[in-house]
Amino acid sequence: MTAPALIPRNALAWLLTAQVVVLIPQLPRLPIWVSVLWIVCAVWRVQIQRMRWSYPGPLLKTLAMLVAVAGVFGEQGSLLGLDAAVMLLLLLFMLKLLEMRTPRDALVVIYLGFFIVATAFLFDQSILLALYQCFSVLVLVAALVGLQQTPGRNDPARALRTGGVLLLQAVPLMLVLFIFFPRVGPLWAVNAPGGQGSVGLSESMAPGDIADLAMSANLAFRVSFEGQVPRQDELYWRAMTLESFDGRRWSHSGLTAGRAPGVWQAEGDAVSYQVVTRATGQLWAFSLRGATTNDSSLMLTQDFMLQARRPINQTMAYSVTSWPESLLHPEPLDVLQRRINLALPEGYDPRTRAWAQTLRQRYPDDQQLINALLVHFNREPFHYTLRPDRLGKHTNDEFLFDSRRGFCAHYAGAMVVVLREVGIPARVVAGYQGGELNPRGNYVLVHQFDAHAWVEAWLPDRGWVSFDPTFQVAPERIEQGLQQAMAGEGSFLEGSPLAGVRYREIGWVNNLRLAWDDVNYQWQLRVLGYQSERQLETFRRWLGTADWQRIGLIMLILIALIMIPLALWTLRPERGDRDPRKRAWQELNQRMARLGLQAHPGEGPRDWQRRLCEALPEQRAALAEFFDQYVLLTYAQTGDRPNRPMLVELRLSLQRLLKSLPRRVPGPAASND
């Protein structure tokens, strides 16, 4: 019985290199002890290769497995969920080093590496990660080459070149499959964990929450318009309505979930646009007032918001048409809607409620009261700030009558409390306001610091009407953006000194930032956003059909047109041997065959040389020069790689010999006998 083949030293070096490359994108999400564990496993594996340490026994391997599981549970608090599963897979990927004994075991480690590469896209789908993971796949393929009995086994550069050629050969097939293969939910379309800091708005809002979100320069979504881009003060991106109030925090009631939207009337000019949003893990989508869409993955809720049918766990692109001047539910509200939008908790904000009753006595008309309230915010010494004072139990009392310093959520929440107290149904609308125009792609960038809250109040015959008390206090916030509004205070992104958007005044920095964002936008729109509906639209535009049978036939034809020529080129006879010495021998033999002087089977170089010299006496010197070089390179040189200068001389001597040969051999010398 033969002993199992051992893993060569060079192959082990490739394996360790591949593991480092594959693990780098995962490190920011891993605790430091995971990196320490990999170093321990790598050092142990090297010592095993040097025959200084032995393989771990069954007891030690079992203990290591239990420690890994316990570490995951201690770090994640569970063995279920995305983070825990990926972390456990990474630990097994590392521990497998200690169990490798044969090349077959090494293959398992490499195959696991391909799965690890894919898991990185569960957390990030940026173009930079995609480019890096192409390099990771190249290293893994090179490790596969280095593990085989090929010249690349002892030549890292050659293994890397071979891996690159294999990947380039796969690119045409990859493109055909990307374009034509039926789109299914991508690997990263799972319930990835995330909080407010990473996904934006949450389902509830305390006075300071949006102010905290305004400290983030992360991108929320991008919008491209058909035609002229609306003015900054017209871009109110609705996400959700916050109707429930517990005295401090506003939240979505959920009581109207699943109910059909009320009657609404389209008024004014329509605006058509496309939104590309990042994964939020939430259901809400972003749109302007009076939105409609033909996207089957979205629906219109009772409060006239666009909502996804499933949580948005991947980049999503959808088209919308809105009528910003539309009338939303001009008919009387039903009992449930009035009760929800008039509810106030008992025992909170007594001064605010008393002041609201005073306003009602002075202004019995709803519109007059609202106008008076807005004038109050405009004329009294209120301040718009990202550094609001801490408020106690009666948040609205302290804000309206004591501090008078706040962010949009303070003004919107206080206004809704006043309106509800006097019997006007009202709610807070959370979303984003404004955006930054990128002239390179003519689309609008909406960042997390554009998060905003405003008020919707229901008025007879007019339905839900939008009011923004923040505009009365800081109109520059609505008309120009947060950066201009906070210029005097200096609080704009003060905790993010490296955020590129802070340096919009520096021309070349801003141009680079916008150019790179345009690249990312095209990546999200055309690659990540290439899902089933966009794919079918592409088929209708290119092929004039969306019939999958016809599309499947076209795909098979394209694959055949790609693979057959590629296979013929790869398997062509002249590619059978890449050794330059053997190629020179074959080229001379083909030329001599025309003269009837080809080499006999089993004939050595010196015997062939003597026979050729007898038949071609005038080429004796050229023959001697070529065969001397060939014999020296083939039999006298040691090592796998022949001397490059000598190979050049061999090639030159062959060219001189071929040029000197006659078209035919005169007389009886042409005989092969």
Image (cartoon, rainbow, N blue to C red):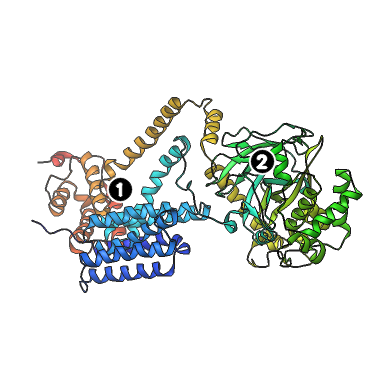
* Quadrant of the frame with the N terminus: bottom left
Asked whether 518 or 105 is in front, the reply is: 105
Q: Please, what is the three-letter code of the amino acid marked with disc 1?
A: Lys
**Circle 1 is placed at which residue position?**
659
Q: Residue furthest bottom?
A: 52
Mark 1 or mark 2: name the one nearer the start of the chain.
Answer: 2
Q: Tag 2: Cα neighbours inside 10 Å, few (<14), some, or many (≥20)? A: many
Q: What element carries label 1?
A: helix
Q: Would residue 374 be visible to someone looking at this image?
A: no
Residue corresponding to mark 2 = 305
Residue sitting at x 23%, y 63%:
8
Residue in front for this viewpoint, 603 or 399? 399
Residue shown at 41% from the left, 54% from the top: 80
Vertical arrangement, residue 188 with respect to residue 564, above or below: below
Left or right placement of residue 168 versus residue 641 in this view = right
Residue pushed farthest front? 347
Quarter of the image where one finds residue 548: top left
Q: Where is residue 277 in the image (x, y as percent from the top left)?
A: 60, 47
Image coordinates for residue 398, horizontal then vertical, percent? 77, 64
